[in-house]
Amino acid sequence: MTDILTHFPPTAAHARDRLAAFAPLAGSAYAMRRNFDYGPGMHGSVSVLSPYVRLRMLDEVAMSRIALAHHSAQEAEKFLAEVFWRTYWKGWMELRPTVWEDYQSDLARLRNEIQTQSGLRARWQDACLGQTGIAPFDAWAHELAQTGYLHNHARMWFASIWVFTLNMPWQLGADFFLRHLLDGDAAVNTLSWRWVAGIQTPGKTYLARADNIAKFTNGRFSSVAGLAQTAVPPQTDVPPAPRLLPRVPEPDRGAPYGLLLHDDDIDAARLIKGHPTPASWAYLDTSSGHSPWQMAPHVSAFRCAAAQDQAQGETGLSILKTAQDLRDWAVGAGVEQIVTPYAPVSPTQAVLAAYTTLPDAPPLHLDRRPLDTQSWPLATKGFFPFRKHIPQLISEFVERG
Ligand SMILES: Cc1cc2nc3c(=O)[nH]c(=O)nc-3n(C[C@H](O)[C@H](O)[C@H](O)COP(=O)(O)OP(=O)(O)OC[C@H]3O[C@@H](n4cnc5c(N)ncnc54)[C@H](O)[C@@H]3O)c2cc1C
């Protein structure tokens, strides 16, 4: 685990340095090479910034601004499209929270099935331990567990083999990812797995092919045998209609406040800029809410260490886990209100919602980023209609902002 945090130092300074180092490659080099997975420790064709983006130590504005400082909009188009794919998935899920709830119910059911069905349990264990005998799949399972990261193309191949070759429920694969990825995210992960499995875009599945794997792993895995030759789309329900984005009132920073950071937005500097200093600081660690199984320890370790870094100079950053912890901290610190970044659909959102039902809990004020308020409601259909709005979002938030 120490090794993982050595490769991903959990500091804002490191995130900025890594972004600056990658920026010269975010143009045509990225467009040409981004699909190549050269193997563990060799991911120079992509930014490997996702653990920092996940916590919003880097946001779309910072990523786009530096990319456009080095490249024309046309050269940086592919990189910017990927940056805003994430925005799109976040918005899509935020407008349809029941998709995450359904996934969690499915996992609870599958957990029971794993306990009662030895055949499923054995296949699931082999897949998670990288013992299926499918060489690239096993290598990616090990890479994920040992590094907390996988290249995007490897994620696509892995998910496809999980679903169509190993015939296992996509939800168990999504859970395996969420337990180990440093960037594991309720919206992006769930919707990406649904996309591979043919649920997100009905009728469209992603099939991992041996020749594609051989080419884009630069020959590391040639002649992979035994992969499914077809990926038949499952019968799917119509996705729920998008809801309106909940309104959030502006927080009043006049009264003494406690600042609560969490893994959906850990950027403290944005929250305190131009405001009185918080009376107390805390971090809400909801990592364990991502899975009914034990999370890999590096996930929580990375996030808690990043929170410590954000609260620089604060010796007593409280690490909280439950709604009750949150109330006890706020009451104990004597704050009149809690200010926290808006949490989209996630375990954190669930804990914050539970907090507001507790008696004597000081009011909670959610601070949502203007870019989120503007971009998430645009995720009503597929990515391609959403994509048309990217130039306008960039013009408003990156060039003018
Ligand atoms: C099955 C599956 C599960 C995934 N689970 C997650 C997840 O839990 N969390 C997560 O952040 N990403 C997830 N992704 C998307 C993508 O694989 C990662 O964001 C990307 O690999 C991160 O590496 P990078 O920072 O080097 O990306 P780069 O290629 O350098 O891209 C820059 C940034 O753009 C965003 N981005 C890039 N590709 C995508 C994409 N396909 N979809 C959405 N955003 C993207 C990320 O924030 C990334 O940091 C998943 C993809 C698949 C196929």
Image (cartoon, rainbow, N blue to C red):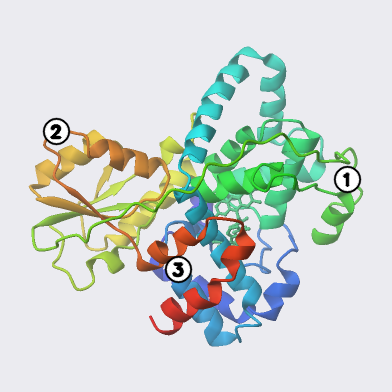
Give the percent coordinates (x, y) of residue 183: 52, 52
Mark 1 = which residue? 224
Question: Residue drawn 57% across and 42% down?
Answer: 239
Is residue 260 visible in the rendered image? The answer is: yes
Q: Which mark is residue 14?
A: 3
Q: Is mark 2 within 8 Å of ligand 1?
A: no
Q: Which mark is residue 359?
A: 2
23 or 60: nearer the viewer: 60
In the depicted structure, whether residue 107 falls above or below residue 51: above
**Real-space Cα separation, disc 2 to disc 3, in angstroms:** 41 Å
Q: Is residue 259 left or right of residue 126?
A: left
Is residue 7 visible in the rendered image? The answer is: no
Q: Please, what is the three-letter code of the amino acid marked with disc 3?
A: His
**Real-space Cα separation, disc 2 to disc 1, in angstroms:** 59 Å
Question: Residue drawn 73% across and 60% down?
Answer: 37
Give the percent coordinates (x, y) of residue 134: 81, 39
Give the percent coordinates (x, y) of residue 238: 61, 40
Q: Where is residue 321, by image quadrant?
A: top left
Q: Is residue 384 left or right of residue 318?
A: right
Assign a secondary structure to mark 1: loop
Please rate how many residues cluster around mark 2, counting C-alpha atoms within 10 Å: few if below 14, some from 14 to 19, many from 20.
few
In the image, which is nearer the foreground, mark 2 or mark 1?
A: 2
**Real-space Cα separation, disc 3 to disc 1, in angstroms:** 38 Å
